[in-house]
Amino acid sequence: MQDLTLYAIPAFVVLMLVEAGLDRQRRRDTVPTGAATRGYEPRDTAASLAMGLGNRIIIVLAHVITIGAFFWLYEHRSLTLGSAWWVWVLLFFVEDFTYYWFHRASHEVRFLWAAHENHHSSERYNLSTALRQSWTTPFTELLFYWPLPLLGFHPTMLLTQKAISLLYQFWIHTEHIARLGAAERLLNTPSNHRVHHGSNLEYLDRNHGGILIVWDRLFGTYEPERARVRYGLTKRLDSFNPLAIAFHEWAALARDLRRADSWRTRLGYLFAPPGWSPDGSTLTARQLRAAEGLTADAA
């Protein structure tokens, strides 16, 4: 089964080169006020590309499990939907809705965050950041996507739509596209996704959509881009080593589990949001926002 994203690799490379050229031009035309810290940095870009390459290799292994499970579930489907145009339209919305909850859970459940947070570890925001993909998330997607083949969506269609969503999300990782007017209310745009990558308190755990932003508006996780975005993690990762990027949060989770003195605490570390602690010595994003009186903007 062919992965559509592989065909897009030449386009990814060309677009990153174009963006890097625009960054250089911007730096020449801008008075130095800290703007030089934006754009591409060789070590950061190399780390993102290494993460993307590792992700592609691991997905080959993960698909042995996920594709097999999808086809097994499809054999036990409740409906036979076929492949008519309206099924593709329905799948578009169902897959995007599923992605929203998978992505949101990946920010709100500690062990899922351990798999996902490396995508947020760069303090730059450019097209190469889109390729900074997890080495462990491919093994967690099945937790959310299993109902789709059981409902009657053919696995080939599901994998195609998932690839389309991933391809769409490449172009929104840029600072060179400003707000897009009315499209901001419907689609996940560069502006909406810049918020998602922000470590600003008001931006934490916001704008989880894949192609559509409407789910965030419906479920209270939408935040428009207002203040300048500070990219990266709330606790800075001072490493460009792909192994450290991929596994440092797993290592932190393992340390917390070893120190836990009860199963209740261990379950909290695994399933509570990042930042949770049994004694309140560290706080979750929701607790921090509540302390500051910040709420989501559902406008």
Image (tube, rainbow, N blue to C red):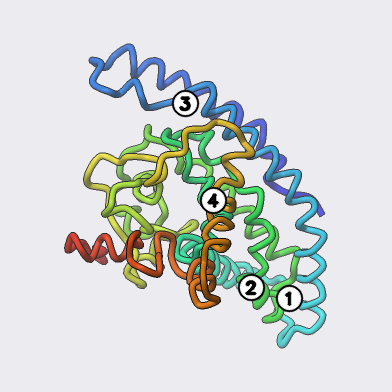
Residue 159, relative to residue 45: is it above or below? below
What amino acid is at disc 3? Glu
Real-space CA distance between mark 1 and mark 3, rounded to the nearest whole angstrom? 41 Å
Q: Label 1: which residue? A: 82
Q: Secondary structure at mark 2?
A: helix
Residue 191, relative to residue 204: is it above or below? above
Q: Label 2: which residue? A: 87
Q: Secondary structure at mark 4?
A: helix
What amino acid is at disc 1? Gly
Q: Percent x, y for residue 218?
A: 35, 72
Q: Label 4: which residue? A: 249
What amino acid is at disc 2? Val
Real-space CA distance between mark 4 and mark 1, rounded to the nearest whole angstrom? 42 Å
Crowding near the residue tagged with mark 4, few <14, some 14–19, many ≥20 C-alpha atoms within 10 Å: some
Residue 20, relative to residue 184: is it above or below? above
Q: Secondary structure at mark 3?
A: helix
Crowding near the residue tagged with mark 1, few <14, some 14–19, many ≥20 C-alpha atoms within 10 Å: few
Numbered tag placed on residue 36 in the rendering: none
Q: Percent x, y for residue 196?
A: 39, 51
Q: Earlier in the sequence, mark 3 or mark 2?
A: 3
Can residue 93 be seen here? The reply is no
Q: Earlier in the sequence, mark 2 or mark 4?
A: 2
